[in-house]
Image: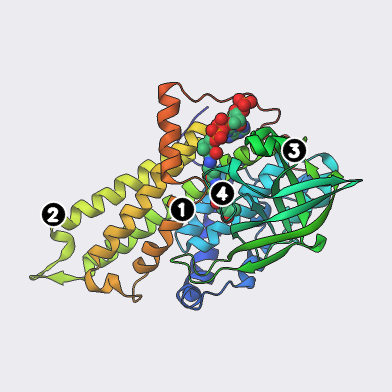
Amino acid sequence: MLGFTLNEDQEMLAKTVKDFATKEVEPKIAELDEKQQFDDSILEKMKELDLLGVCIPEKYGGAGFDYVSLGLACEELEAVDTSLRVILSVHVGLNSMTMLTWANEEQKQKYLAPQARGEKIATFGLTEPNAGSDVRGLQTTAKKEGDHYVLNGEKMWISLADVADHFLIFAWTDMEKKKQKDYKGISCFIVSRDMGIETGTIHGKLGVRAGNTGWIAMNDVKVPAENMMGEEGEGFKIAMSALDNGRYTVAAGATGLVRACRDACLKYSKERETFGNPIGDYQLVKQMIAKMVRDYETSRLLYLKVGWMKNEGLRHTKEVSLAKWVACDASEAASGDAVQLHGAYGFSNEYPVERYYRNCKGAVIYEGTREIQQLMQADYALGNRKDGNVRKELPKYDPSEWLEE
Ligand code: CAA
């Protein structure tokens, strides 16, 4: 049944994450952002809090919370800084939840379990220097040689590239299909760093400067054939189902960013006076605040609905695309207004709204641009897009399965 109250576990998790983010990260985040520094101790703390396997069943090393809890955690993390939420987006959303759906039992024990325990960090290698929205345009190849595949290619804009131990890599295994851009020629591989993958960090980003974003290079990287995830040719569908998870975390996080903008503006509107009155007394300021209130509540409803659909095991590609689009646009609007409302102070790093304004933009672009989400929504409405059958779906949340005695 759909309800509008969070249960005790969900409330408790949200509070734990909020305490961690506000007490342990918020005091140092401006400095990390300025220095473009990824702080490993944050990962350590997230591991201690079991966040790195938050919605993975206990039998695979996770904490056994439901998918709504994952969304709540993302909201709380991004209310402090986008870089925190990005960790859950790639490690849990794009990688671990995708392994939970598609990996075989042996792969789950070998790769997913240490990820969920936080012993290994994981990311997702789909995007390339010349292929972002156009997934079929990727160039990485995986050629079979005996009991191995040999991977060659480059990945770009990969969150945690320089930090991760495990990578899901998408590559063409069928070179004829590659020529025709037939998605059925793409496969997915579980690759670990020690197989010979090289990575580097990209500096000079507009935002999310306390996060790690980088590139991956693969030159004759030998990957055991048993590390193919799913069947040969299933890579495109695996990538799309991974994005259903990643987009959920992005939507929930962007909702947290809207909330952070709203709260910063509420505080400033009461403190700052012009023409003898607090600026919150003026209608044009109230209008900005009202939009933030509206956008926070709307974005939150949309992502929580997706979390509920995930818990119920329902296909939610359409809903998560809408939630991602709405929340990311809302965070862009809210952070723009938040800077405006703070006046000249908003233009400096004396207040966090300047960081929110820079941080919001990435999510309007990655994991499916605003324009891709718009095309998807229009095509669903016009009847041009329908959800096809998939061999495997994200498992429904079942506490009797997810929690051990
Ligand atoms: N789950 C499972 N299967 C799916 C699916 C999903 N969510 N979405 C599509 N499929 C299936 C379809 O049913 C179809 O199968 P059939 O042929 O059997 O019917 C097949 O996949 C092909 O689907 P489409 O026809 O929809 O494929 P398309 O080429 O038209 O692609 C698209 C549509 C919406 C443009 C898609 O390519 C897309 O979403 N592009 C954006 C990619 C993206 O978000 N990239 C960001 C990567 S991650 C990142 O940036 C960050 C990082 O740090 C790692």
- Give the left or right position of residue 185, taking residue 310 as reference: right
Q: Nearer the viewer, residue 369 or 118?
A: 369
The secondary element bearing badge 1 is classed as helix
The image position of residue 99, as x and y in percent, is: 72, 44
Is residue 379 visible to the viewer in this orientation of the structure?
yes
Is residue 8 visible to the viewer in this orientation of the structure?
no
Ligand 1 - quadrant of the structure image: top right
How far apart marks 1 and 3 lie (CA) works out to 32 Å
Picture quadrant where residue 257 is located: bottom left
The image position of residue 226, as x and y in percent, is: 86, 44
- Give the left or right position of residue 69, taking residue 82 as reference: right
Residue to which mark 3 is pinned: 174
Residue to which mark 2 is pinned: 283
The secondary element bearing badge 3 is classed as loop
Residue to which mark 4 is pinned: 131
Picture quadrant where residue 383 is located: top left
Residue at 28% in and 64% down: 339
- Nearest-to-viewer mark from 2 and 3: 3
Tag 4: amino acid: Ala
Residue to which mark 1 is pinned: 363
